[in-house]
């Protein structure tokens, strides 16, 4: 059995939709109700839960973030204190139960009839752990020495498969960054904590010239006001409250639009694949040739030239403030200077002149 299951585990790492098949085989061979691969994210957040022969209603009851705390879940508590490939079993669970904060996970085990079993950690890292377990019903009874020995023999194969899939998921950060590099776009590829894991050359250039920076592994803006908006946008994406969010970041070279997009969920993702991307791009309004003409001919600053181009495009003052991430008072100050340099007194006169100059 071990060699056949070892091959099935490695096949699952390459074709993750096959995980349930190999878990089914492990459960059958160990005469258990279920075999399980579970991911626990940072701070014991819920990652994923793959269990053979578990229906949707049982998953809905089990797959809840509040049940992942080690003060609630004796299995998570056992995993949090053991190094990889160390087996915990019913004796360990019994020792932990008296210290649980409440009965919610014990009630779940009773409802799903999974009071017994054994487990090990296949991977333990700062950004989470992946556990492997047998879940046994009353009719299966507690694990015995022979069952735990059989479980131990397949743990190495399961660990190798998990390590392979995690490595493949992590390699995809570079693939995503490379794709955006081919499109000549500045791209930061983010993990589920919104930390940067790969960047394109364009993104590297923005870091090198100080337009953006990294703080604790995350993209940060030099301006405190922009940073607050960027942090809020990142939280919106990280908490899955939206699929995309944008922030305008004024820079000496003009506005830089920071657009964060959550990538599509992958059903058999262990949590180490790219979660989101941040694209940094100058808005189309900042046409370089027209802006250069206005700067050279009328002595406009980069900010004034961009505001002039936005006016020519028919943007309202409110829209310009949003695009430039500035207040109404700041915009009025720019417009006074802009009108003086163009030799006009009103906004409508400026727009007519700009159409005539740039048509």
Image (cartoon, grey):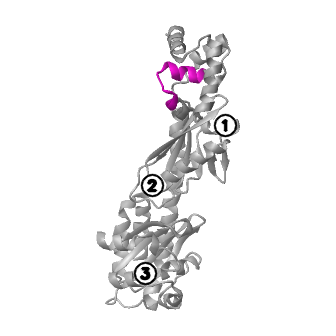
Q: Quadrant of the N terminus?
A: bottom left
Picture residue at 59% right of the left edge, 18% below the top: 291
Residue ID for mark 1: 211
**Which sits in the foreground, 98 or 154?**
98
**Which sits in the foreground, 74 or 65?**
65
Whether residue 36 is visible here, answered yes or no, is yes
Range of residues picked out in magenta? 305-319
Residue at the right extreme, as displayed: 209
Mark pair 3, 2: CA separation: 26 Å
Residue ID for mark 3: 105
Q: Are marks 3 and 2 in contact (CB under 8 Å)?
A: no
317 drawn magenta? yes
Mark 1 residue element: loop
Q: Is residue 32 above or below residue 237?
A: below
| Coordinates of residue 194 in the picture (x, y in percent) | 55, 53
Q: Which secondary structure dominates the residues rendered in magenta?
A: helix
Picture residue at 56% right of the left edge, 20% below the top: 308
């Amino acid at each position: 059995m071990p060699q056949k299951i070892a091959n099935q585990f490695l096949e699952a790492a390459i074709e993750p939709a096959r995980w349930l098949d190999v878990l089914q085989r492990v459960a059958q061979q160990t005469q258990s109700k279920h075999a399980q691969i579970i991911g626990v994210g940072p701070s014991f957040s819920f990652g994923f839960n793959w269990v053979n022969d578990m229906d949707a209603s049982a998953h809905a009851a089990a797959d809840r973030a509040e049940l992942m705390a080690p003060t609630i879940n004796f299995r998570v508590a056992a995993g949090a204190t053991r190094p990889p490939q160390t087996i915990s079993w019913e004796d360990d669970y019994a020792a932990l139960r008296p210290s649980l904060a409440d009965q919610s996970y014990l009630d779940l085990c009773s409802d799903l009839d999974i009071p017994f079993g054994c487990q090990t950690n296949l991977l333990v890292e700062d950004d989470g752990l992946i556990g492997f377990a047998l879940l046994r019903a009353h009719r299966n009874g507690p694990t015995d020495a022979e069952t735990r020995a059989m479980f131990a023999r397949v743990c190495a194969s399961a660990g190798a498969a998990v390590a392979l899939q995690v490595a493949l998921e992590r390699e995809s950060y570079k693939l995503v960054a490379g794709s955006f590099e081919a499109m000549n776009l500045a791209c930061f590829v983010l993990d589920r904590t919104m930390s940067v894991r790969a960047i394109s050359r364009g993104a590297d250039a923005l870091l090198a010239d100080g337009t953006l920076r990294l703080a604790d592994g995350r993209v940060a803006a030099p301006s405190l006001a922009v940073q607050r908006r960027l942090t809020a946008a990142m939280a919106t994406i990280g908490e899955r409250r939206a699929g995309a969010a944008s922030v305008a970041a004024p820079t000496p070279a003009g506005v830089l639009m920071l657009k964060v997009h959550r990538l599509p969920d992958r059903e058999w993702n262990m949590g180490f694949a790219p979660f989101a991307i941040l694209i940094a791009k100058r808005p189309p309004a900042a046409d370089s040739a027209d802006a250069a003409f206005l700067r050279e001919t009328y002595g406009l600053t980069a900010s004034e030239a961009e505001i002039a181009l936005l006016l020519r495009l028919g943007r309202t003052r409110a829209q310009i403030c949003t695009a430039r991430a500035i207040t109404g008072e700041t915009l009025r100050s720019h417009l006074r200077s802009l009108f003086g340099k163009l030799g006009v007194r009103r906004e409508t006169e400026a727009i007519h002149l700009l159409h005539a100059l740039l048509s």
